[in-house]
Image (tube, helix red, strand yellow):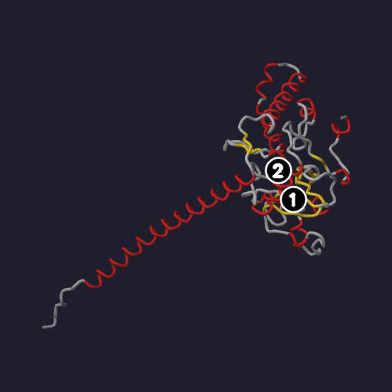
Amino acid sequence: MAARLLSNRVDREDLAVGDHIYSWRAAYIYAHHGIYIGDEMVIHFTRAAGHEIGTGTFLDSFLFSSSPAASSAGDSPPCQRCGHLVRPDGVVMSCLDCFLHGGSLYLFHYGVSPAFFLAKARGGTCTLAASDPGDAVAHRARYLLDKGFGAYSLFKNNCEDFAIYCKTGLLVETAFSVGRSGQLASLTAAFSAVASSPLRFLTTSAGGLAVVTTGMYCVGRYVSDIGVRRDVVKVPVETLVAQTSATATTMEAEVAAETSASAMEADVPAENSAVAVAADADTVRPPAVDRGS
């Protein structure tokens, strides 16, 4: 227990099919998550080619990316083992070496106790939620590799959300909240702890303020965990894909309808102008008066 509490590092020889693994990036700023499916292959979720994580804005320039697409898009040759599997975005499969990209291998823990969970001050390393059997986890990951996991969202649908869903089958029902990611939950909890600074008036000592702030941070992390939240529901992967496809089709239809309506509105003034010009051209003008006679 002490070793697990201090570090989640694991040897690749100890991995089992269906394990949720991760590797820290950019000096431990964030971690990239995936599902180990055996034979040293990993299925994981990315934002775009060469981008494991991001917002689609200039902020991405501060985030280090190391997906297989990044290597194949540069001057270095693609990986001989998984280079042919590279996709432009979404759920991808790569070898363990490309997934780690020189980083260390860590194992995400499930079904931990509240005390263990709170002792791990950094989010995105464990959860109170129980994991499903490895074969069920691998089935979800492979199914989503073929069908997709929807649009990437740093705050609601990122690589950790993908891995947690594969492990548990749990989805967040409410729209106005972060997803299942422990990393985002920790960030939210940190902001809540800072926002709770007015509580400093409850204490006059620096130690008391530290206790209040730490307490708010721990409470924020705990209530945001997927194993504690009440706004989660278990959804079969086939149902998830069907719902995602239906939502995408509906959105495409709405966009097409809006585009068509805008085009029609733009054409109406042009048609009116053309009619006006034609009417002016057809107007019978009075004959000119000959002032010379």
Which quadrant, please, contains the N terminus?
top right
Q: Where 98 sits versus 130, above or below?
A: below
Residue 106 location (% of width, % of height): 83, 42
Most distant residue in the bottom direction: 293
- Whichever of labels 2 and 1 marks the residue nearer the N terminus, that label is 1
Q: How crowded is mark 1: few (under 14 residues within 10 Å), some or many (20 or more)?
A: many
The x and y percentages for residue 268 are: 35, 60
Residue found at x 73% / y 59%: 86
Q: Image point 78% across, 39% down: which residue?
A: 108
Question: In the picture, residue 231 is in which quadrant?
Answer: top right
- Numbered circles on residues, count: 2
SS type, badge 2: helix
- Asked whether 70 or 290 is in front, the reply is 70
Residue for badge 2: 166
Which of the two residues, 146 or 96, is positioned nearer the viewer here? Answer: 146
What amino acid is found at the position of numbered circle 1 in the picture? Ile
Work out which residue is located at the far left of the displayed protein and give it.
Answer: 293
Residue 56 appears left or right of 204:
left
Q: Residue at x 39, y 59 (%)?
A: 264
Along the viewing direction, whichever of 106 and 54 lies nearer the viewer? 106
Classify 203 as above or below 81: above
Instruction: Name the residue carrying label 1.
Output: 43
Residue 243 rendering spot, x and y as whole percentages? 57, 46
The amino acid type, in three-letter code, at marker 2 is Cys
Which of 10 and 285 lies nearest the eye of the viewer? 10
Residue 265 sits in quarter: bottom left
Separation of residues labelled 2 and 1 (CA atoms)? 10 Å
Determine contact: label 2, label 1, CB under 8 Å: yes
Helix, strand or loop for disc 1: strand
